[in-house]
Image (spheres, rainbow, N blue to C red):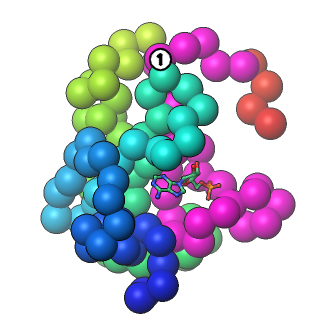
Amino acid sequence: MDNCLFCRIVAGEIPSTKVYEDEYCYAFRDINPQAPTHVLVVPKQHVANIGEANQLSNEALRACIEAIAKIAAQEGLTGGYRVISNCGPDACQSVPHLHFHILGGRQMADQMA
Ligand code: AMP
């Protein structure tokens, strides 16, 4: 998608701080971190949100999910971490390219929303 922010980040057209990459997914630091560690994991293939995850191959979906634990280990999140994927307007999704937020490095609130 030519005008998708995260597609352009994956393509290297917009700078990002890369944390992890494999054949199917790319992960980078959130520009407005909400926790000491705040990383976004995105599939390289454009899908709008988790509601379209069935458009990804099994390999791509699995790679995104497995990347989360790899990144958490890489970031030293031994105490745990939170994974969030906002889907649509009620969830305040602001970038319509599927992404998983990994938040860690501090105690999370016990309320999720
Ligand atoms: P969401 O609101 O769930 O769609 O999350 C989008 C996230 O993308 C927000 O946490 C933003 O801070 C983050 N973001 C927006 N633009 C950039 C960028 N250029 N580089 C890194 N993160 C970004």
Q: Give the magenta part as a residue range.
A: 80-109
Is residue 100 depicted above or below 109 in this figure? below
Direction from residue 44 to residue 38 in the image, left or right: right
Residue 17: percent from left, percent from top: 30, 46
- Per the image, is 90 magenta? yes
Q: In which quarter of the view is residue 113 placed?
A: top right
Q: Residue furthest left?
A: 23
- Image quadrant containing the N terminus: bottom left
- At a point 38% along the width and 74% down the height, the residue shown is 7
Residue 53: percent from left, percent from top: 49, 70
Ligand 1 - quadrant of the structure image: bottom right
Direction from residue 2 to residue 85 in the image, left or right: right
Q: Amino acid at mark 1?
A: Gly
Residue 60 in view (yes/no): no
- At a point 41% along the width and 88% down the height, the residue shown is 2
Is residue 61 depicted above or below 82 in this figure? below
Residue 90: percent from left, percent from top: 83, 60
Direction from residue 48 to residue 60 in the image, left or right: left
Question: In this figure, which residue is indicated by the disc labeled 1?
Answer: 105
- At a point 17% along the width and 57% down the height, the residue shown is 22
Is residue 76 depicted above or below 100 in this figure? above
Residue 69: percent from left, percent from top: 33, 34
Around disc 1, counting alpha carbons within 10 Å, would you say few (fewer than 14), some (14 to 19), or many (20 or more)? some
Per the image, label 1 sits on a secondary structure element best described as: loop
